[in-house]
Image: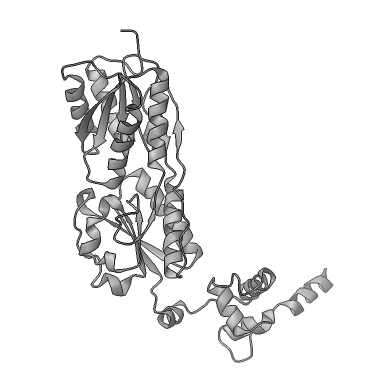
Amino acid sequence: MCAVHQSRRKSRPTVARGSTRPTSRDVAEAAGVSQAAVSLVLGDKWRGRVSQPTADRVREAARQLGYRPNLAARNLRLGRTRTVLLVVPVLTTEFFAGVYTGAARIAAEHGFGVVLYPSPEGIGPARDPFASAQAALDGVIASSMAADALTAIRGDQLPLVMLDSDPEGSLGAATVNLDITDGIRQVTEHLLALGHRHFLHLAADVPSWTFDIRARELATRTATVPGTTVRTARAPITIEDARTATETALGAPGPRPTALVCDDDKLAAGAYKAIRRLGLRIPDDISVTGLDDLALATAIDPELTTVKLDAELFGERGMQALLAVLDGRTPQEGDIPVQLVVRGSTAPPSAS
């Protein structure tokens, strides 16, 4: 045992005499590489330039020496603050909390910090959170629902990634999208296969590309089946507004819809309240679907059939795209897949 401990002490890298803290030169000597290689590895720019075993050796030497890079000096040298702004509509939703978690995880792996900034009232201009956003930030990730805030904080003049945004009109920025089109396709085909022909679309009353996509795809899919009708009611994304809009829509003249397609799980929760106030049953009298798969989807009864959106993966991909832009690389292409989760809120329409 003593011999083993002595051997380990001898093999442990040491700091040069007179040095108060280990330097990159100490790490380079311990790992048997150049200081340039140490800089590449610890700056996470080694791939394709330094071998994996060499990178592992450098990191192990740095760990054993207790070396910590001088981030302030490195950032000054690179002209970066290593700070990213994430602009979202609101802080209080489970979905955007997940987006932040995913973005912050990837950021931390690359030595970046993420500042979370909500656009007031969910949409519209926001006050500049910094004396000069351009001087304080390396880049911005923004939801399309908070896009108007970018002009006020001059975020559209920084490296920018847009989430849930039209690739053809996103201020020239890189875009990362969930496959919302496929999500609505899955919902519509599920309801059509059950036999539903009369739909009510409870649409989010928010001017955003992502909600336009929902309406467009629902109309496209239902138009392929003769005898199908779609009625639309709009509501802000709150439970009470959704309840009011649903009560009004279901009380209107004409055939009562047998399927209610909601743009959001919170809208679906409001629709549940309206349907019960009208003395109707879910899914016996009317089927209901949502979109997001929030925690409340399984808290309401019956549990909600909805489309699962991976918010954390969405945030991860957004941060990865911004890192690619900052490095002059092309971000990963392709929308993030989504999945219909069928639960108890959908069934074939009743004979009556």
| Quadrant housing residue 236 | top left
| Quadrant housing residue 9 | bottom right
Coloring scheme used: one colour
Would residue 184 be found to the left or right of residue 202 on screen?
Answer: right
Name the residue nearer the viewer: 111 or 253: 253
Looking at the image, residue 94 lies above or below residue 85:
above
Quadrant housing the N terminus: bottom right
Please state the horizontal and vertical placement of residue 261, each as a whole percent of the image.
Answer: 31, 29
Looking at the image, residue 212 lies above or below residue 227:
below
Q: Residue at x 24, y 17 (%)?
A: 256
Would residue 321 be found to the left or right of residue 132 on screen?
Answer: right
Name the residue nearer the viewer: 222 or 317: 222
Q: Residue at x 24, y 67 (%)?
A: 154
Looking at the image, residue 12 lies above or below residue 129:
below
Please state the horizontal and vertical placement of residue 166, each as a whole percent of the image.
Answer: 32, 51
Please state the horizontal and vertical placement of residue 287, each as a whole percent of the image.
Answer: 34, 21
Answer yes or no: is residue 318 visible.
Answer: yes
Q: Residue at x 39, y 49 (%)?
A: 177
Answer yes or no: is residue 304 visible.
Answer: no
Would residue 129 be found to the left or right of residue 109 on screen?
Answer: left
Q: Residue at x 81, y 71 (%)?
A: 4
Seen as rendered, the residue at the extreme bottom is 18
Quadrant housing the C terminus: top left
